[in-house]
Amino acid sequence: MTGLIIAGLVIVALILLNAFFSMAETSLTAASRARMASLEKEGDAAAKRVSDLQEDRERMIGAVLLGANFVTIAASAIASTIFSGLYGEAGPVIATLALTPLLLVFGEVMPKTFAITNADKLARSVSLPVAWMVKILAPIVAGVQIIVNQSLRLMGVKVAEGIDVLAARAEILGTVELHAEEGAVEINMRDRLRGALDLSDLTIGDMMIHRKAIRMLNADLPPREIAAQATASAHTRIPLWRGEPENIVGVLHARDLLRAISEKGRDGFSTVDVARKPWFVPETTSAEDQLAEFLRRREHFALVVDEYGALMGLITLEDILEEIVGDIKDEHDVAVVGVRPQPDGSVNVDGVVPIRDLNRAMNWDLPDEEAVTVAGLVIHEAQAIPEPGQRFAFHGYRFQVLRRYRNQITALRIEREEMADAEGGA
């Protein structure tokens, strides 16, 4: 009888030990690396241990799983011995039926549920014993890793080393999206964080002001005429061309113009001498790199050219910052009406509106990989230039062409498909 009690106590201890391994594995893998890094900088030794374990996650998980499997097998063997003595040949079956729910509930589900809800705190608590386990079991874990890697290679699976499966950018973006859906992060904050993370994926060609919309001046105009047009403009920097609009010879800055007028009068200055040298950048430059160049050169304005050197548009520091913080307005900005929500839930959109701006304004998710503007997206999907009145459905939205001027779609009506279906069924 005493032997049975002792064996039962040993099984209980093994179940509790299995619970420890389950909590350790879950908490150490779920703990926030950013939070641990922050605590480590504050001198938290436990946070440093957690960070070290997460750096070599494969060894940490290998050691924990090795301990957990040993405990499970030991508990099963002891239980089978006990029940075999009591029930004979049926003992192993009874032991399995009795032990499985105990291990599942108290050794796996309950500890893992507790660990996932207290990951950061629990990870720091279990880091010391797990760190010792990793050191003690290192030779065994290393041997297991070699066997696993060699077995995978024999099956034709290449084992990559030094690759973090969860890229930092994707992990941060996924966390932001998750918290935004749960309401912990405001939509505006989500857009700012997502905009900053997306800069590396965007080129300046995706956000530039197209050459058709650029306000330019002929450098051969009389100085008085240039001064009049420049001071009447809402822009502080105006490109100057000579011979043809493609031939940009300089960029006139309002501050330089006013200084020249104050020194030499409206007719006494040379426009080209006052203008600054234009800065040309390729349209394939990433927004992140262009932002770094703006900051390095302390410039705010650049002209965008294609691979042949032809003028495509212009990009400003403000354009890139708006990708992060949203539309920036000052007292000189002219409000651009391009997105007009309708009472029925649809939206009338100008064709030139950038897809990213529409997504931000309406909290939509239209793709912007193949086109920059809404009109460009419709043309890309339709593989043609639609006529007014034509309707399309793609990416979960319905589009109707409202107006077209020559080969340019100037206005569209857009609505979500589920909204349209609800109205149609009502």
Image (spheres, rainbow, N blue to C red):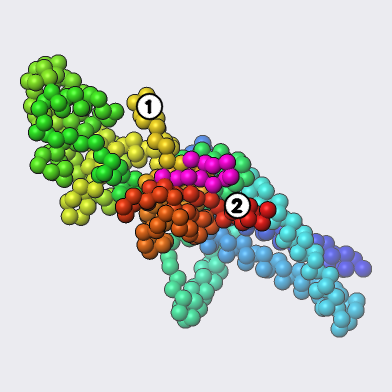
Mark 1 Cα shell of 10 Å, populated few (<14), some (14-19), many (≥20): few
Residue at 15 percent across and 27 percent down: it is 226
- Quadrant for residue 70, please give it: bottom right
Cβ atoms at labels 2 and 1 below 8 Å apart: no
Left/right placement of residue 240 relative to residue 294 reads left
Q: Which residue is mark 1?
A: 330
Left/right placement of residue 321 relative to residue 34 reads left
Q: How many marks?
A: 2
Q: Quick check: 130 above or below 258?
A: below
Residue 71 among those drawn in magenta:
no
Q: Quick check: 222 above or below 144?
A: above
SS at badge 2:
helix
Mark 2 Cα shell of 10 Å, populated few (<14), some (14-19), many (≥20): some
Left/right placement of residue 270 relative to residue 118 reads left
What kind of residue is marked 1?
A: Asp
Q: Is residue 36 visible?
A: no
In terms of sequence position, does the residue under pointer 2 or pointer 1 come before the other? 1
Residue at 14 percent across and 31 percent down: it is 275
Farthest residue in the right direction? 1
SS at badge 1:
loop
Q: Which residue is mark 2?
A: 419
Residue at 9 percent across and 17 percent down: it is 264
Residue range (magenta): 340-350
Residue 344 among those drawn in magenta:
yes
Residue 281, numbered label: none
> In the image shown, does 375 or 83 lie closer to the viewer?
375
> Percent from the top left, x then y, of residue 198?
41, 48
> Label 2, label 1: how many angstroms apart (C-alpha)?
36 Å
> Percent from the top left, x then y, of residue 394?
49, 60
> In the image shown, does 316 or 222 lie closer to the viewer?
222
Q: Quadrant of the N terminus?
A: bottom right
Left/right placement of residue 329 relative to residue 249 reads right
